[in-house]
Amino acid sequence: GAGVSQSPRYKVAKRGQDVALRCDPISGHVSLFWYQQALGQGPEFLTYFQNEAQLDKSGLPSDRFFAERPEGSVSTLKIQRTQQEDSAVYLCASRSRGAGETQYFGPGTRLLVL
Amino acid sequence: DQQVKQNSPSLSVQEGRISILNCDYTNSMFDYFLWYKKYPAEGPTFLISISSIKDKNEDGRFTVFLNKSAKHLSLHIVPSQPGDSAVYFCAASGLVQGAQKLVFGQGTRLTINP
């Protein structure tokens, strides 16, 4: 079956611009996660949804970052007034049920803020 | 503070030999551990996992060992193949409610030489 898909794959933004990154999880997966991966580092947790409920947003670095999953499937990560330090790969992962199940990752969106 | 550490940024192994990748963690609340493999411009791909009730899990050429007292896990790949060349991340999570996110190490770049 289809895996996790993300769009766009690459995004170049001017500093101060708003961006929106989309994640389509595996069909039927209840849980959805966003991670940020800086160059040469491991992914770092941003936020977690169970269905449409955002249960953990402790990793969002500032109030410029906002995520939603209004119908419990597709999710959007929005970054307002982008800064150069926001340049990273943004990864989305989905999981079928609860903890103890594997998270499956999409290919990521590479964001470059100039 | 880095809760999951992969102290070797890179590892080079001859084809056909054993590759051993190591990972240490500090948080005793972690009880579920995973290894992911990542090729350039792709998302992490799940390899193998282990829960803290076990000390070994095997899947084909891949075996993960967990030493809870030392807070250490390792991934053994035998025999190593050129297609195994990638960056490997270990990740840890909790099975308790509210500990859903994965915490990643910095990654180890494995190169298999023909």
Image (cartoon, grey):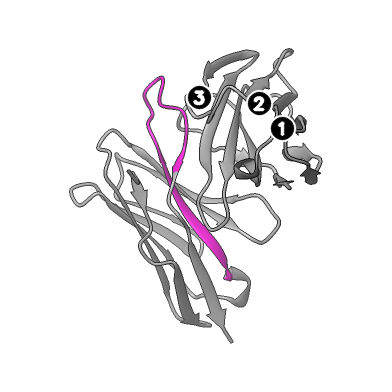
Q: Amino acid at mark 3?
A: Gly
Give how far across and how far down residue A79 sits, in percent. 69, 29
Q: How many marks?
A: 3
Q: Do pointers 2 and 3 mark residues of a single chain?
A: yes
Other residues around mark 2 within 10 Å, as few (<14) / some (14–19) / many (≥20): some
Give the Cα distance between marks 2 and 3.
10 Å
Cβ atoms at labels 2 and 3 below 8 Å apart: no
Q: What residue do we see at 73% from left, 21% from top?
A: A73
Q: Do pointers 2 and 1 mark residues of a single chain?
A: yes
Give how far across and how far down residue B75 sits, in percent. 41, 61
The answer to whether any part of residue A1 appears in the image is no
Q: Which mark is residue A98?
A: 3
Instruction: Tell me the SS state at disc 3.
Output: loop
Q: Which residue is mark 1?
A: A26
Cβ atoms at labels 2 and 1 below 8 Å apart: yes
Give the Cα distance between marks 2 and 1.
6 Å
Residue A76 lies in quadrant: top right
Q: Earlier in the sequence, mark 3 or mark 1?
A: 1
Give how far across and how far down residue B89 sits, in percent. 48, 54
Q: Amino acid at mark 1?
A: Ile
Residue B73 lies in quadrant: bottom left
Q: Amino acid at mark 2?
A: His
Q: Which mark is residue A29?
A: 2
Q: Chain of mark 3?
A: A
Q: Locate the N terminus of chain B and report the quarter of the image it occupies.
A: top left
Give the Cα distance between marks 3 and 1.
15 Å
**Compared to A95, does B18 lie above or below?**
below
Magenta segment, which residues? B85-103
